[in-house]
Image: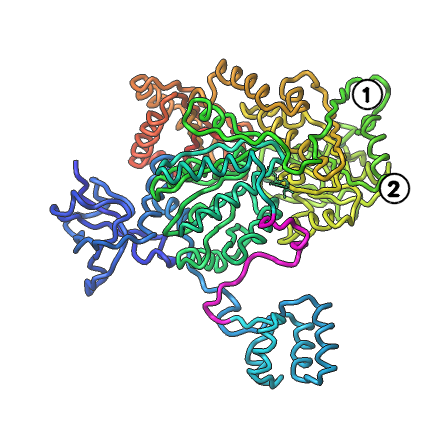
Amino acid sequence: MLPEYADIIIDISHEAIDKTFQYKIPETMRERIHVGAMVNIPFGRGNTLRTGYVVALTNTPEFDVAKMKEIDSLCTNSVEIESSLIELAAFMKEQYGSTTIQALKTVMPIKEKVKGLTHKEVRLLVTTEEARKYIALYKKKNAKAKVRLLKELIEDKVIPFSLVTGKLNISSTTLHALVHDKVVEVEEEGYYRDVIKNELGESELPDTSVIVPNDEQQAVIDKVMADYEARKRETYLLKGITGSGKTLVYIEIIERMIAKGKQAIVLIPEIALTYQTVKRFRRHFGDKVTIMNSKLSKGERYDQFEKAKNGDVSVMIGPRSALFAPFRNLGVIIVDEEHETTYKSEQPPKYDAREVAMERARMSGAFVVLGSATPSVESYYNAMEGNYQLLTLTKRAVEQAALAEVSVVDMREELKKGNRSIFSDELKTLIQDRLEKKQQIMLFLNRRGFAGFVSCRSCGHVFKCPHCDVSLTEHFTGTPNAKLSCHYCGYEIKRPPECPKCHSNMIAGFGLGTQKVEEYVKKMFPQAKVLRMDADTTKNKDAHETILSQFANGEADIMVGTQMIVKGHDFSNVTLVGVIAADLTLFENDYKSAEKTFDLLTQAAGRAGRGDRKGQVVIQTYAPDHYCIETAAKQDYDAFYKEERAYRKLLSYPPFTNVLVVYMEDDNYEELVKLSEALKTIFTAWGAEERIQVIGPCDATIVKINDRYRRVINLKQKDYDALVRIKNLTETFIKNREEFKKCYIAFDFNPTHSY
Ligand code: ADP
Ligand code: ZN
Ligand code: ZN
């Protein structure tokens, strides 16, 4: 049946995204209309014609058809970039489940005025120190106006243009001279703010334009470009060991695509953690590259999208959201560290950025390169099945940089020897050795959460969050600011001096967190300078960059941290990496936990010995025989994959089946149970036809968060589309049921974490 009604959005670049309007589709138009089409519609009281975009088509009217207006006409030959993004939003809504508005908001930035840039400003471009040197120079030349302006700018960095021309009485010639010398810049309304920081060690980065790809890298580049020339559009999986020079391959491919007038999107897991990658691109492509990032203001984000739309940049780097850069001539999408779970969105639509990248590439005639040292099991499976083209880099790019030597220490044996410390004897000796040699050390604690729980040693009372089914964790231990907080809802109390139950003062935190590791290190090696990088120390905007660059500049001997320290960083002076407790992520109740642990261990191992000295890695574990630890120690991905594949197949997990999690949330537990049972009944009925396996309903692992109860039903079926059909049926079903109105329901296909 052809669609009779269309949901239309007007003026997508404005906050109006929150509202769509439904129109009748004239019969003559029904064959041609499609999601993303630009249309003319009568709007408002006066029925003035305005343009809008079709965001959804339907046969069920949402309000009185008699009062509904009709679309006036289709705008022909307007191939707007917005229309293809709206199509992409429709694809995402269908594939992953969400409202139209949620899907649109995912692909469109919201326009907002950039604060502070509505008028002209003058900004200092050099460091304070350099400015002082200029002042000395100008003083010699008796250039008083320049000295006056620079003195003011040393104080304030950015000052209004009106102050410069007014009170400071600086002539435009003087200002121009300073702008020309790149000492200051003038920002005007409509000016795009540059969002890549320049000050941090960029000059130390290798200049990629002088590095010549080695044979392996060249073969990969040639293969990809030959396919492109032959009009073959493929998805490539670039599997290259850590340090094999994947970034250079990306850069060379992009350079060739830019030469063809094409544009590129580079997805990275998280910008703060991959700032070295961003800098390498910046160094190579200069201001042709920009970034997207959740830490940017809405105005800044909007600016970066405008730059892309107007063709002012050719490369967009960023996490998931960079995928929606409105490039009109997109040629290639790179997904670096493709195995990272951050590529899966946590909000509806809970999309997989790799899949959406492939869809966007298909729509734009572009191709996709997925890159990783430890490809996700799904991607490698796809490559083995011939769905992706496998490309490999097997050698480290820097000749002297051999793979690190890895030793596995059985912590049970340490305990038997009477060593109760968190460091094995081997790790202790090696740390001492590196400190003496003035080489750097990374100590890695692979846990997602924080230091365990807090309880009373006398009566066993555990401090729990009153709003969530979790225990509180301690922060700023041993300081007057010590507090207990909930990581799920943010609930926080001052650390109580005594137990509320038995009034004992024997309250203590259990479990191992990075803060504890830092304390141990400081106690054991008082001469060492230690940096810590974890969620607590990186709350502020540029904290990641600051810590990483301090470490890169040799301001510390040891860096202690969570997974954020092992991802992609290239520190040539690090020759020892210690994994404190490798099993922490291994026994989470999640089918991906072995894969995640293997990835982290391999990545950690890849941090050592990047320069010309051989690196060493110590993995401390209580499960030295687990295949994931054994294979990670050998840095043998293929051996890991073989074991993991067998396990997934046996237990029927992705990639051997697809899983749809139907997640439900309600503030009344009894009602939630009733609703989940009702859904189960209808799933079982529909599922029989589609041969879908229904598992559950059951409580989520954490049954209560923020005073809301959570339950899940798992649906399994190899055929992804069958699960999409069930999802669609469910959406329609609950829409018309009063009892489901206040229960929140979300869908998650092949989740990357357990519920
Ligand atoms: P990966 O991302 O694969 O782990 P990187 O891209 O970080 O590896 O490269 C590792 C190091 O090798 C970097 O310092 C990089 O500059 C260097 N490198 C890459 N390709 C070459 C090459 N062809 N010749 C010399 N050095 C290279
Ligand atoms: Zn007590
Ligand atoms: Zn809580």
Q: Is residue 289 left or right of residue 478?
A: left
Q: x%, y% of residue 198?
A: 62, 58
Which mark is on residue 381? none
- Write the start and end of the magenta stretch as one range: 188-210
From the image, which quarter does the N terminus lie in? top left
Disc 2/disc 1 C-alpha distance (Å): 23 Å
Which mark is on residue 526? 2
Q: Is residue 34 left or right of residue 664?
A: left
Classified by dominant secondary structure, the portion drawn in magenta counts as loop
Is 607 located above or below residue 543 in the figure? above
Q: x%, y% of residue 3?
A: 19, 41
Q: Decide: marks 2, 1 in contact (CB < 8 A)?
A: no
Is 699 located above or below residue 31 in the figure? above
Mark 1 lies on residue: 414
Residue, x 72% and y 47% (percent of image)? 552
Residue type beneath disc 2: Pro
Looking at the image, which is closer to me, 247 or 208?
208
Dividing the picture into quadrants, the one containing residue 608 is top right
Q: Is residue 51 left or right of residue 422?
A: left
Q: Secondary structure at mark 2?
A: loop
Asked whether residue 451 appears in the rendered view, the answer is no
Local crowd at mark 2 within 10 Å, few (<14), some, or many (≥20)?
few
Where ligand 2 lies, by quadrant? Answer: top right
Local crowd at mark 1 within 10 Å, few (<14), some, or many (≥20)?
some
Q: x%, y% of residue 275?
A: 61, 48
Residue, x 53% and y 38% (percent of image)? 218
Q: Secondary structure at mark 1?
A: helix
Q: Earlier in the sequence, mark 2 or mark 1?
A: 1
Asked whether residue 250 appears in the rendered view, the answer is yes
Is 571 located above or below residue 470 in the figure? below
Label 2, ligand 1: CB separation under 8 Å: no
